[in-house]
Amino acid sequence: MTTGKSQHPKAQPPIPAGIRDVAKAAGVSATTVSHALSGKGRVPPATVEKVKAAVENLRYRPNPNARALKNKRSGVLVLAIPELEGTLTGSDFGFFMRVIAGASVAALKMGSVLAVASAGETATGSLGDVPYDGAIIADPVPNDLRVDVVESRRAPIVTIGRIPGDDRYPWVDNDHADAVRMVLDELVSRGAERPALLTLNEETGATSYYADVLRGYSSWCADHGIRPVVATSIAGDAKSARAGARRLLRRKVRPDAIHAVIDELARAVDIVAREQHLRIPQDVSLSSLSVTPGTDSELPVLRIAIDPEEQGRRAVEALEALVDGRRDVDNVIVPVKLVDGRA
């Protein structure tokens, strides 16, 4: 007599492959598998390839809980961004959101979770008593409080962008000096003869990015026998940005090209140019950094396109290597490319 319920036993989910299954398939010990996957020890390349093939065939995934217990890890990485109030620009927010997206995915793939905190939260806020294995410091500045706090907990540090004058920690960055030289060469190829720079002042633009751009621009001018023309503004201040653009466009010998370090400054140049009945790019060529392609201003601007997601991913990989005990972690330069925004 049936009861209306299925008489077939419920299918059981397959048991995930373990490290011993991988070892058996590769014909090695479990210890060798562990060393091959972690990079520790001296495992012959041919053996590493056999282990990787077995991992792929069995779809083996390390147990993050077991890994954390074995290595006395919390399984938490911190991404410490600057304070969200004050001098941050829209470009900054776009950059950090993309960094967070790339770093979060990378951390999960490596068996960790990513906690995001501002400078104040890193020191005294919700992360004050939370254990974490290491921290990524985004856009560090000299004497950065975030670095001091993480160091006090003896946790490894990787930075996105470099700490000016401090090379103690591995970093992930773009070669912004070379990128500016590249964009200036392109502007000259389009007919520019007097390129100028619109950047932030030293107080609100204290990160290595602004220093690198200025260095790249200055060295390019020296190489080409051109007198540098630089105007500065205050980060997050639209009025100051327009004032900086006016200082350039009202010069007796007006620049025929301007490189703006962020999109907000490029928009300021466009506003002031229209005030003076100048056309972009016909009368003034314009270039800028591209942080968020979907929201960058729709101007005919030659852009230096960076990849914040890749920076986040590479920073997590470097931090995981430090947490696992490696000391030979290299700095990483993420390539950029030029994007033609001419109408």
Image (cartoon, helix red, strand yellow):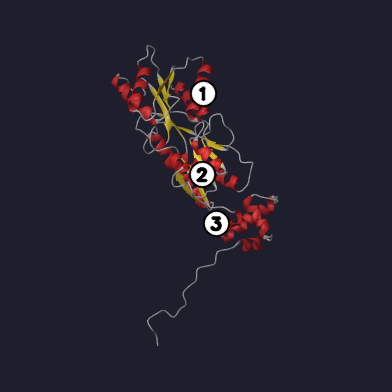
In what quadrant of the picture does the N terminus appear? bottom left
Residue drawn at the location 34% of the way across and 21% of the way down: 243
Which of the marked residues, 2 or 1, is nearer the chain's N terminus? 1
Q: Residue 99: percent from the left, percent from the top?
A: 46, 41
From the viewer's perspective, is residue 154 above or below residue 302?
below
Residue 263 visible here: yes
User: Circle 3 sits in a helix, a strand or a loop, which is it?
Assistant: helix
Q: Amino acid at mark 1?
A: Arg
In depth, the one of 252 and 237 nearer the eye is: 237
Q: Amino acid at mark 3?
A: Pro
Which of the marked residues, 2 or 3, is nearer the chain's N terminus? 3
Q: Amino acid at mark 2?
A: Arg
Residue drawn at the location 37% of the way across and 35% of the way down: 90
Residue 313's tag is 2
Residue 269 visible here: no
Residue assigned mark 1 = 215
Q: Residue 167: percent from the left, percent from the top?
A: 58, 33
Residue assigned mark 3 = 64
Task: Please report contact status of discs 1 and 3: CB closer than 8 Å, yes or no.
Answer: no
Residue drawn at the location 51% of the way across and 14% of the way down: 225
The crowding category of the residue bearing disc 2, from other C-alpha atoms within 10 Å (few below 14, some 14 to 19, many at least 20), is many
The crowding category of the residue bearing disc 1, from other C-alpha atoms within 10 Å (few below 14, some 14 to 19, many at least 20), is some
> Quarter of the image holding residue 96?
top left
Which of the marked residues, 1 or 3, is nearer the chain's N terminus? 3
Marks 1 and 3: which is nearer the front? 3
Rounded to the nearest whole Å, what is the CA distance between mark 2 and mark 1?
A: 27 Å
Residue 327's tag is none
